[in-house]
């Protein structure tokens, strides 16, 4: 069964450093998303991406964040200058439907900012 | 922002019995609801969904009920199995563009043998 994959599974970085989280969505999906879950809190939407551009972003997704689809398979989330409060699980998701109904999630990357 | 609420942080049931997980929402713009199951150190796994034009959707052991007037939905698992032990999230979606999913805080279900 096709699945969303994410790398790395765990990333430790120092405050102020740049990180890139990588995702490979399900191959025939065209709509891509990033969510995050801070420990003990709910899963929160960050950004959605379609046709090589951001279609919607949350207020969390400020200028420190960017997304890219550098080739036909990868989808990346970059945090330019990490803060302690960026520590969270980051989930990539993809869907085949424009309205993002059934979104399929990857296993997540645990980002720890020290 | 409490658009989707799951007021029970945990639920314990015995194997073979029914599990009922509840979810309330405040945003009238939601027209689609989804339930996800999550194991520790894994991503949310899609379980079942329901459109706002329906009041029930069934898939095997899982049934979701929607009461639009009460802004309430519930997930029924019958019969419950120990492997169902996980955190269950409900999420709402609006039919506007490439909309985000708005998640509740989750309910931890423990099914004991």
Image: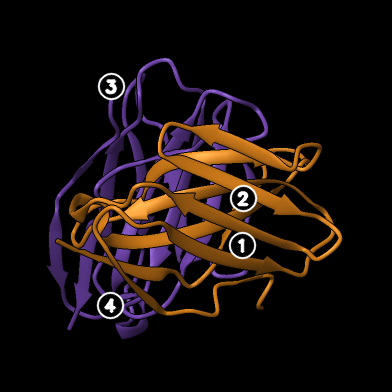
Chain colours: A purple, B orange
Image point 28% across, 21% down: which residue? A2
Q: CA distance from mark 1 to mark 4?
A: 22 Å
Q: Secondary structure at mark 3?
A: loop
User: Which label sits on residue A58?
Assistant: 1
Q: Are marks 1 and 2 in contact (CB under 8 Å)?
A: yes
Whether residue B43 is visible here, answered yes or no, is: yes
Q: CA distance from mark 3 to mark 1?
A: 28 Å
Image point 28% across, 52% down: which residue? B16
Q: CA distance from mark 3 to mark 4?
A: 36 Å
Q: Going by the image, does B49 lie left or right of A19? A: right
The residue under label 3 is: A2
x, y percent for residue B25:
71, 67
Q: CA distance from mark 4 to mark 2?
A: 28 Å
x, y percent for residue A26:
35, 24
Q: Going by the image, does B21 lie left or right of B17? A: right
Q: Going by the image, does A3 lie left or right of B75? A: left
Q: CA distance from mark 1 to mark 2?
A: 9 Å
State which chain disc 1 sits on: A
User: Which label sits on residue B100?
Assistant: 2
Q: Secondary structure at mark 2?
A: loop
The residue under label 4 is: A16
Q: Are marks 3 and 2 in contact (CB under 8 Å)?
A: no
Please name which of the two marks, 3 or 4, marks the residue nearer to the observer. 3
Q: Going by the image, does B7 lie left or right of B45? A: right
Q: Residue furthest top?
A: A28
Please name which of the two marks, 4 or 2, marks the residue nearer to the observer. 2
């Amino acid at each position: 069964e096709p699945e969303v994959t994410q790398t790395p599974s765990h990333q430790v970085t120092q405050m102020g450093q740049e990180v890139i989280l990588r995702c490979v969505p399900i191959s025939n999906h065209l709509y891509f998303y990033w969510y995050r879950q801070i420990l003990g809190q709910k899963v929160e939407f960050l950004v959605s991406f379609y046709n090589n551009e951001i279609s919607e972003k949350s207020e969390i997704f400020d200028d420190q964040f960017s997304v890219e689809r550098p080739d036909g398979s990868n989808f990346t989330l970059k945090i330019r200058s990490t803060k302690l409060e960026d520590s969270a699980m980051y989930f990539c998701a993809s869907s085949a439907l424009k309205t993002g109904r059934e979104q399929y999630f990857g296993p997540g990357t645990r980002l720890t900012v020290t | 922002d409490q658009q989707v609420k799951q007021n029970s942080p945990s639920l314990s049931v015995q194997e073979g019995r029914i599990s009922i997980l509840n979810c309330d929402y405040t945003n009238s713009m939601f027209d689609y609801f989804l339930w996800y199951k999550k194991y520790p150190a894994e991503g949310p796994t899609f379980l079942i969904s329901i459109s706002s034009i329906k009041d029930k959707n069934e898939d095997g052991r899982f049934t979701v009920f929607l009461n639009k007037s009460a802004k309430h939905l519930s997930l029924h698992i019958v019969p419950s199995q120990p492997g169902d032990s996980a955190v269950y999230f409900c999420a709402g979606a609006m039919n506007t563009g490439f909309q985000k999913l708005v998640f509740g805080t989750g309910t931890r279900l423990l099914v004991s043998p």
